[in-house]
Amino acid sequence: MKYLVSVVVIIVLIACGGGEKKTQEATAKYTYVTPTSEMLTNGKAVFDKYCHICHKEGIGGAAMLTDKVRWTENRSKDLDLLVQHVHDGYTGNYGTMTPMGTCMECSKDDLRDAILYMMDEANVL
Ligand code: HEC
């Protein structure tokens, strides 16, 4: 009986594999989701304070908020990659975005929320 209990415990431990799951999350953290109202509220606040400088009117080659074609193009990239591009700064075919999209105190989650907010406004999610 004792033997059986330890076998069951070992199986449960293997099945849970806690450590493995964490590694997976670290490599692919951000995936497209339907944004919650909290994410949209936070994303709008970041947009209104920072991203709007370029993305509202499409200054310097930035995708305008209403430019569905450009936002569809952005949407075709992994969200993880987009968050990384905003974080590090990015130069593509249209122009150059400054690192953090000028929001130096933003976390990656804040940047993700701002991206999803803009995509939601552009109707490409
Ligand atoms: C100084 C102007 C500027 C600001 C401020 C700015 N952006 Fe950008 N952004 C750009 C430009 C220009 C591009 C286009 C780069 C290209 O594709 O050539 C861009 C592209 C992007 C892309 C697409 C990246 C890709 O891989 O194609 C995303 C997503 C984005 N911006 C999000 C944001 C967010 C979120 C903020 C605010 C936190 C922000 N931007 C603030 C100028 C700006």
Image: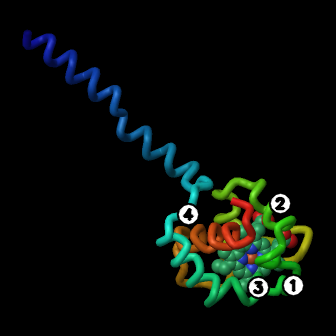
* Dot 2: element: helix
Q: CA distance from mark 2 to mark 1?
A: 17 Å
Q: Residue at x 58, y 49 (%)?
A: 28
Callout 4–callout 2 Cβ contact below 8 Å: no
Looking at this view, is 57 or 105 the one in front?
57
Relative placement, left or right, of 23 versus 82 is: left
Q: CA distance from mark 4 to mark 2?
A: 19 Å
Whether residue 60 can be seen here: yes
Disc 1 crowd rating (10 Å Cα; few below 14, some 14-19, many 20+) is: few
Against 91, residue 11 (above or below) is above
* Dot 3: element: loop
Q: CA distance from mark 1 to mark 3?
A: 11 Å
Instruction: Tell me: is circle 3 under 8 Å from ligand 1.
Output: no
* Dot 4: element: loop
In the picture of the structure, the residue carrying the numbered disc 3 is 56
Q: Amino acid at mark 1?
A: Gly
- Position of residue 68 measured from the top left corner of the image (x, y, whole percent): 82, 67
Q: Which mark is residue 73?
A: 2
Q: What is the quadrant of residue 6 in the picture?
A: top left
Instruction: Tell me: is circle 2 under 8 Å from ligand 1.
Output: yes
Against 5, residue 20 (above or below) is below
Q: Amino acid at mark 4?
A: Pro
Q: Which mark is residue 60?
A: 1
Q: Residue at x 81, y 78 (%)?
A: 64
**Where, quadrant-wise, is the C terminus in this rendering?**
bottom right
